Image (cartoon, rainbow, N blue to C red):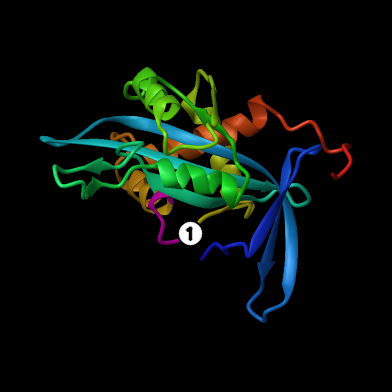
Amino acid sequence: MAIPKPTQGNYNRRRDTTTLHFLDDDGKAYTNEYVMRGGFCFPMSIWTGNREEIAGYAVVIGRDVRSGVHTVFKESKVLAIDHVTNSEGRIKYQGLAPWLNDAWTTYFCKWFHWHGRTGSVDHWMRDIKRSAMVSPKPKFSECIWDDDSEVDHTMSLLAIHGKLKCDKDGGFMNQIQAYQTNQAVPYPARIAVKACLAGFHQFAWTRKDADYD
């Protein structure tokens, strides 16, 4: 399914939620309130056969306060934080900085979760902290679990019950499909989504009784 893009949003400071405004296919306006979290898989070395690839991934997921549906609103490969330019100042590789900024300005997502020492975590954390392009700076928390199968089971149950929605043509869905045929390779999009889903549980939202601003 195609994930709808909000026409606007507002941050509910006291509740620490985001209310997003949408238009349906008939042009009728509607709103949903979400707890917003992000997931990160820091770039790491992945070998497929004799080929090495450096790959990372980031997602923004909103959990509907009323329905419990988790929607992957934003997703992106991670190759660099700031743009990588050539000697003439032209962009060679797109950095994640504008994506991180949009995660806040559009979805008011400022908290990202990660799992495992994939790649050089400290290096990427420093790049984000030092980046003049990333503003405001996001918050990062590590999610810890012993058994991957438990988190995989949680993700599968959400999908089976229609409570995990994503772009059918997006990188996460593509990697889910690839995982079905080859589970020997790590898939950064799956790692990022799993970390985010674990974050919803390990760092639970507790402001459901708070007033709106």
Q: Where is residue 3 in the image (x, y as percent from the top left)?
A: 54, 62
Q: Where is residue 18 in the image (x, y as percent from the top left)?
A: 70, 48
SS for tag 1? loop
Outermost residue to the front = 88
- Nearest to the observer: residue 26 or residue 139: 139
Residue 107: x percent and y percent? 61, 49
Q: Nearer the viewer, residue 183 or 114?
A: 114
Quadrant the C terminus occupies: top right
The amino acid at mark 1 is Asp
9 on left or right of 79: right
On screen, residue 175 versus residue 71, left or right, reads: left
Mark 1 is surrounded, within 10 Å at the Cα level, by few (under 14), some (14 to 19) or many (20 or more) other residues, namely some
Q: In which quarter of the image is residue 23?
A: bottom right
Q: What stretch is highlighted in magenta?
A: 168-172
Q: Main secondary structure of the magenta part?
A: loop
Relative horizontal placement of residue 136, taking residue 202 as reference (left or right): left
What residue is drawn where x is 50% and y is 36%? Answer: 39
Instruction: Please state which of residues 91 and 63 is positioned toward the viewer in this rendering.
Output: 91
Give how far across and how far down residue 176 sits, in percent. Answer: 41, 48
Residue 152 is at least partly visible in this image:
no
Residue 196 in view (yes/no):
yes
- Most distant residue in the bottom direction: 26
User: Going by the picture, which residue comes out furthest to the left?
Assistant: 50
Q: In this view, does 90 lie above or below 55?
A: below
Q: Nearer the viewer, residue 190 or 136?
A: 136
Magenta stretch: residue 170 in it?
yes
Labels in figure, total: 1
At x 45% / y 61%, what residue is drawn?
Answer: 168
Residue 15 part of the magenta segment = no
Query: Please, is residue 54 above or below residue 65 in the view?
Result: above
Look at 47% across and 25% down and name the residue there. Answer: 115
Instruction: Write down the residue under mark 1.
Output: 167
